Each structure stands twice: as structure tokens, then as C-alpha cells.
Amino acid sequence: MATDLCCRRALSAIGLAFIVGGLCLSAAAADTPVANTSTIHPTLDDGFTLLYNLDFDQAHQVFMSWQHEYPGNPMGPTCDAAGLLFSEFHRLGVLEGQFYVNDQAFAARKKLDPDPALRDRFNAALEQAESKAKTRLATDPKDRDALFAMTLSSGLRADYAALIEKRNLASLHYTKVANAWADQLLEVDPNCYDAHIAAGFSKYIIGSMSAPVRWIVRLGGVSGDRQAGIREMQVTAKRGRYLAPFARMLLAIAYVREKDKPRARELLASLRDEFPRNPLFAREIARLDAGQ
């Protein structure tokens, strides 16, 4: 019984990374000017800008256009899957939730009612991305885009399992897979700073657990180190391309858990000032100021 309780707590804590990820990725660039999709060659950056602005339809069009231009590259369908996932988060209200800064709040979350058609599109996009990535890796095991696509694909599967289906064990499995791909990616390209984010937050959360729970989770192949996790998140926050605002948000969550509300507030204030049309940052600052 005690072991089962420890496992549930461990899985709930790991899942915090994904609920926060959904909140942050939807909010990260709400004040960024909408990308000019009339350009002849839309980029993945254009798609992410639209995605962060919750313009899911236009983001989908950009990602599909990019896939048409680069049919063999797995990043196109991977990014499209991300857009589908975040649109489902938005529809289901996941993005409107408060920050989950403790295990109990995450464990009490409800299992949601997904859109079957969107789920099928999401899974099909990931299967297409993984197939293309594996084809490229069979020829070149150091293919950066293929490794990045496999990293993101596993992370997106973990998000869907944790946040929509409430399948914690499956989410833990995909977390391990994502971390393994991220390690390979960083060996090939140490400058892919976005790759640090998933492992960083997982290390922080697991490192925050009690010793018996850390031991149980380590048996599943996932280790933790609070300070190492913070350092990895700081790398993405300072030097990441797509996920720098995401990393700053995760660091704010970490600082709240560390009882360092001034640093958390400082990060949130910088994001509020950078993205003034995004209400999430001001709302979370108000909660901190109210002592919640």
C-alpha cells in the first residue's frame, strides 16, 4: 500500500511538467506580432508565432505549407501535431487552469473528454513524423532534425497521455523516451538549447521528492537533481529558440516551489511586460501577491 502511494505521488509529480508545459506553450508569445503567412516561404517560426497566439488554423496552414516544401523532413508533421495538441488543450479548458504547484492539485485533475477526430489526426501526424525521422536516422544517425522530431514527438505523446487521458504510467514512459532522444540530440548539436527543457523540469520535480519516492522512480529509469534541473531550464530560458518563454515560466514555477516568490514574480513580470496582451502573467502575479 505504501509503495503504491509513493508511485502515485511520483507519477503525479512528473506529470506537473506536462500541465505546466500546456499552460506555458499556449501563453508564451501572445504579444508577438502575427506572422506574415503571405510570404512565399513560411517558416516553422511563423507557425509557432501563430500557435502561441492561439491562431491554430493559420498555424496548421503554415505547417502544411512547410511540409509541402520539405516533404522528407519530420519537423513539419511534428509541429502540426503540436498545434493540434494545443488546440485541444484550448478547447478543453486545460489552458485556463491555475498553475499546479503541488502534487495534490495535479493528482485531483479530471480525465477529459477528447475529440476522437482530432486525436486521430494528432496520432497520424506523430506516426508520420516518427516514420520520416526513423528513415532519415537509418541513413544518418546524427540527423539533427530527425532527432529533434523524435524528442518533440515523445514529449507530445507524454502531454496527451498525462493531461487529456490521465494515463500517468504511459506519460512516464514517453518522458523517458523523450529524455533519451534529447540526450542524443545534444550530443549531435550542443547548441540545440530547446532540448534542455524537458529533462530540466523532470530532474527538478523528481529531485524535489522524498528519498524513497526518488528511489522508486529511479527504478523506472528516471533520475532527479533539483539544482541540475534548474540549471538546464536556465539554459533554455536564456538561449532557447522556440521554448525560451516556456522555460522562463517553468523557472517561475520552480521558484514558487522553492519558496522564492520574489524571483518567480520577477520572471513573471518580465514576461508580462514582454507580452502585455497575455493575461496569464498578470493573473499569476496577482495570485503571488495575494499569497495564494
Image (tube, rainbow, N blue to C red):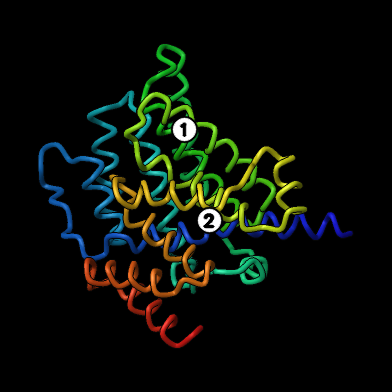
- In this view, the residue in front, 193 or 78, is 193
Check the image and report above or below for 63 versus 20: above
Which of the 4 image quadrants contains residue 251? bottom left
- In this rendering, would 184 be left or right of 15? left
Residue depicted at 35% across the width and 40% down the height: 193
Residue corresponding to mark 2: 17
Q: Where is residue 17 in the image (x, y as percent from the top left)?
A: 53, 56
- Of residue 55 and residue 208, the one placed in the foreground of this image is 208
Q: How crowded is mark 2: few (under 14 residues within 10 Å), some or many (20 or more)?
A: many
Residue at the farthest bottom position: 290
Q: What x and y, as percent, mark residue 5?
A: 80, 60
How far is disc 1 from disc 2 in space, using C-alphas? Answer: 18 Å
Dot 1: element: helix
Q: Is residue 134 placed above or below 246 in the rendered structure?
A: above
What kind of residue is marked 1? Met
The 10 Å Cα crowd at callout 1, few under 14, some 14 to 19, many 20 or more, is: many
On the rendered structure, is 16 left or right of 1? Answer: left
Residue 288, x across and y down, in percent: 44, 80
The N terminus, quarter of image: bottom right
Q: Name the residue under label 1.
A: 150
Residue at point 41% right, 33% down?
149
Residue type of the residue flagged with mark 2: Ala
Q: How many marks overall?
A: 2
